[in-house]
Image (cartoon, rainbow, N blue to C red):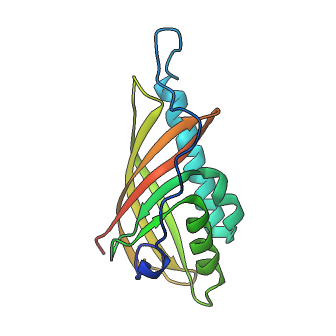
């Protein structure tokens, strides 16, 4: 269960930084409209939720930045790097009784000066046949636009229920 059970054994060092320099918006390059960026991020989150529901770890990889970091909700285990996160999801999907996680975005704040955004919302993990969540809470995610795609750079989860 990502976010609810201990994942400390799965923590790995952060991948080396991308070789491409980070892009900053300048007067010669306009920031994407807030509405378009928010819609793109919501679509990427929906794709991530769909990949979890379908148990498709390969579909999660392209949504994550290479050096992304996830801090889990209960024990604050750090899962660092795209490859490490995909491996954690593969193990999760192979579990005989796994939880189905859904992240529901509330607000998305797009930076007017950098190609980044902050997503804040609620998450829950439920067994497939359960009427109520086994675990739930709040999360934040930092997104970065790179190469025309929004990628998750960091996620922090807090277990509240």
* Residue, far top: 28
* Residue, far left: 160
Report x, y in % for residue 1: 48, 79
User: Along the line of sight, which residue is nearer the eye, 133 or 76?
Assistant: 76
User: Along the line of sight, which residue is nearer the eye, 82 or 119?
Assistant: 82
Q: Is residue 19 above or below residue 33?
A: below
Report x, y in % for residue 27: 46, 9
User: Along the line of sight, which residue is nearer the eye, 11 or 16?
Assistant: 16
- Which quadrant does the C terminus fall into? bottom left
Q: Residue at left 59%, top 57%?
A: 48
Q: Is residue 20 above or below residue 55?
A: above
User: Along the line of sight, which residue is nearer the eye, 34 or 87?
Assistant: 87
**Does residue 77 appear to the left or right of 53 in the view shown?**
left
Report x, y in % for residue 47: 63, 53
Report x, y in % for residue 8: 41, 79
**Does residue 67 appear to the left or right of 4 in the view shown?**
right
Q: Residue at left 50%, top 22%?
A: 33
Q: Is residue 40 above or below residue 3?
A: above
Q: Residue at left 35%, top 70%?
A: 73
Instruction: Kindly indicate the quadrant of the structure image that contains residue 157.
Output: bottom left
Q: Residue at left 49%, top 20%?
A: 31
């Amino acid at each position: 269960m990502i976010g609810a059970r201990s994942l400390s054994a799965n923590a790995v060092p952060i991948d080396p930084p991308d070789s491409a320099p980070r892009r900053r918006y300048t007067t010669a390059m306009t920031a994407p409209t807030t509405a378009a960026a928010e819609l793109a991020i919501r679509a990427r989150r929906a794709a991530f939720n769909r990949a979890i529901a379908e148990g498709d770890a390969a579909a999660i990889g392209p949504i994550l930045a290479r050096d992304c970091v996830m801090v889990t909700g209960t024990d604050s285990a750090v899962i660092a790097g795209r490859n490490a996160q995909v491996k954690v999801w593969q193990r999760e999907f192979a579990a005989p009784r796994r939880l189905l996680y859904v992240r529901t975005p509330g607000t998305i704040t797009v930076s007017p000066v950098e190609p980044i955004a902050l997503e804040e919302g609620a998450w829950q993990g439920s067994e497939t046949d359960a009427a109520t969540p086994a675990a739930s809470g709040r999360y934040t995610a930092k997104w970065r636009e790179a190469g025309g795609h929004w990628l998750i750079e960091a996620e922090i989860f807090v277990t509240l229920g």
